Amino acid sequence: MLNELLLMEAQQEVHERIAQQVPLEETLDAIARWIEVLLPDAVVAFMRFDSKRQALSLFPSQRFSPAYQECLQAVPIGPNAASFGSAAFCREPVFTEDIHTDPRWSAFYDAAEREGLRACWSSPVLTAEGELLGTFGTYFHEPRPPTETSRRRLKQAAALVSLAIVRDRDASSHRALAEWHRSLFVNHPDGVYEFDLEGHFQRGNAALIRITGYPEEALIGRHFNQFIEPAYRERTQAGFDIARRGGSYQYDTVGIHRNGEPYYLEVLNFPVSVDGEVVGVYGVCRDITARKQEEESRRLLERGIQATPNGVVMADATQPDMPLVYANDAFYAITGYAPDEVLGRNCRFLQGPNSDPEAVTAIHWAITERQAVDVALLNYRKDGTPFWNHLSLSPVFDDAGTLTHYIGIQQDITRQREQEAQIAHQATHDLLTGLPNRTAFDECLQTAFERVQEEQGLVVVMHLDLDGFRTINDGLGYHIGNQLLVAVGDRLRQVMGDDDTLARMTGDEFALLLPDLDSRQAAIEMAEQVLHTLSRPFVVEDKPLHISASVGIACNCESVEQAGELMQRADVAVADAKQEGRNIWNWYQCDRHRVTEEAVLLRHDLHTALRHDQFELYYQPIVEAVNGRIRGLEALIRWHHPERGMISPGVFIPLAEQTGQIIPLGRWILRRACQDVATMRAEGGRVVPVAVNISSLQFRRDGFLADVQAALDDAGLPPELLQLEVTESVLLDGAERAIELINQLKAMGILVALDDFGTGFSSLSYLRDLPIHKVKLDRSFIQDIATSRSNAAIVQGIITMAHHLDLVVVAEGIEEREQQQDLIRRHCDLLQGFYFAKPMPRGAVMGLLDLLPEPVAPRAQPISALLVCGQPET
């Protein structure tokens, strides 16, 4: 009864250990104890089978010595491999009643003898599917045959061992699988998470926490759509629903990061099924924001490339012939080719017979050297029409520095080239007549001059100035005048030789370059022929027009160092021809050239004087006629030339007006006068207004009012201390504009006087409308006022008329007492002239103002006579 109880306990222990999945060693040890209860004299042994090596190895056990355990390692199975090897080989139990008499144990006699083993009963351990797992055996220290009970117990024990090993193996496999799954879940670089069937988070890995920004505990139990942008929740729910129904679905959505920022996600949902029933949903997500941005950048780049009007192509630099792998729509539009005619081909198919070999060579060199290049070359469209292509070719390298592609940007510059050619033509030709212009003529003249310098030939230049052209232009209109100029050009072409050059210089002026004449007489005959050709009437719009020309001729017969001197001499000669009666030719005279040359040099010196401040302002007092009180000053410019001394304004002022230098010069006078009066005012002396003469060119120029205001502001001078004097010439280009400007000056606080009154040609009606405050009688009326009744009558009339218009009258050029007394009797308001004072520097006039601070009685002597000794008089 006790034995049965022990047997039941041992068997119960075996089953518990198998059910509890304890380590296999403990389960096998429990099975051994159970067998030892059944067979008290038995020593239980377990051997594990290695299917790869087809061998058995004794399972470690304290029941055997280490030597015996070592001996029974990796024993090959076979029909003669002891009891255990034979049982494994034949898959049947093998019973050795006496080891000493069983030849299958021959290889292990000694080991068994040392271990004290005499009998061995072995049974194969097989799975239900017949897989060999090992052997189960019992040893006895004495020879022993098996009984039926022992045979049955042995088979039962083998089944228990099989069950234990299979359960252990299954548990181990399950643990390995679980560990694989856990490792994949935890370490996956993408976010991995589980949902229940309602869409609530069950768990998530570290990548999910990194992607969302939320810790796992903040996600667990919450619905996934709480972390999705509202606009994408419907799409995300649809993806989850597909997985919940047993499908698998991948889609893009937009999540909301913990920091509130949206980010793009790529999501894969798939079901978790147990026994064919969906019990949950797995999700795998990755943050694809950077990829989306890159894709958007690529799309933007693609749209930009497609939107550009320039052709863009890309060639594969890894292929020998560098075939095109991309071309945008603009390329196809420019060339006329279709994609299947372009892709896969080298772009040399655009070249043709007139493509510049140098440009092609430059492209080949750049490709060889892996450099960028910009070239312009002639290409051909599919239909054969040529077009100018500005090609920018650039290499494209990968991150490893390997050249992978070339990108080419093609710009159709055909129209630009045509415009450049047109501009180049226009730069050297007159637009109206189509003749070469001054620039082209000068180049031809230079070339001809250099040639004759080497060959000792003759070069003749003629300058033609049409006589009376302005009358036709003004009388009949510019369109008639233009047609006449074209007709004149056509006539002149008829008398020109093949090597001669005819040019329109400007306006109604033409020039002829005759490089192949053999004598001066031939030049004269040509001039006569020109005059004769132009003498025949022209018919323009059914109107017969007659015109002549003045011709100036110059050649290199005399000493000429520069080609340009020939044209200068012809200019001088044509001016002389004009003065001699027109419709004639005139050969250049040397003396006339010297005068012109002096004017040119003086013009240059005038530029230098403006830069180097060689000018000075003198001031001449303007006094009251009756009492001699100084009421104002007139600013007069003086030029201290470093080599020629003092140059008269009568010489350089007209030159400045002719050359346009009067504008910067007038601006200088205005600013200096304001500064001088401001200095007088700052030094505390008596100050009177200063009058500044303004050229009509300066007066009509845009920005004049701004110049005046700037001069006042820079000097800090009140406007009432500045007066401006203009001549009637300011009315020639529009009285309305002049009146408007004077009104604006008046609004600024500046008074305007009309200078040299009576010498101009303007209508007296303008005098009524001009907002001036003063008129100045020209000195030409004053010189003979005492002896010329006409001059006296004009002066009296002007004074009377001006007073009725509430204007102040100033008489200039007073040099004698009789002139002063006469003008006092005629009630002239103010006088100015050498009789009172010559123009003097600022310092002298300041001393004069301080000397005469109050009005004085009429005097018969000039103011300068009252200056203290040593004060300069100029």
Image: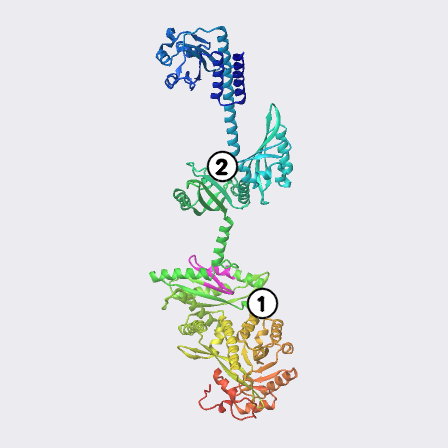
Residue holding disc 2: 343
> For the residue marked with disc 2, what is the amino acid?
Leu
Q: What's the amino acid at mark 1? A: Asp
Residue 796, position as x, y percentages in the image:
61, 87
Secondary structure under the numbered disc 1 in the rendered image:
helix
Of the numbered discs 2 and 1, the one sitting upstream in the chain is 2
Residue 781 or 685: which is nearer the viewer? 685
Classify 380 as above or below 60: below
| The magenta segment | 488-511
Q: Is residue 46 magenta?
A: no
Mark 2 nearby-residue class (10 Å; few <14, some 14–19, many ≥20): some
On the image, the x and y values in percent for residue 75 come to 39, 15
Residue 540 appears at what percent x and percent y?
A: 57, 61
> Toward which corner of the image does residue 49 lie, by quadrant?
top left
Residue 500 inside the magenta-drawn segment: yes
Q: Quadrant of residue 231?
A: top right
- Dots 2, 1 in contact, CB < 8 A: no
Q: Residues within 10 Å of mark 1 (few under 14, many from 20)?
A: few
Q: Can see residue 212?
A: yes
Label 2: state its secondary structure: loop
Q: Check residue 474 in the rendering and tell me which mark sits there, or answer none.
A: 1
Residue 298 spot, x, y in % from top left: 53, 42
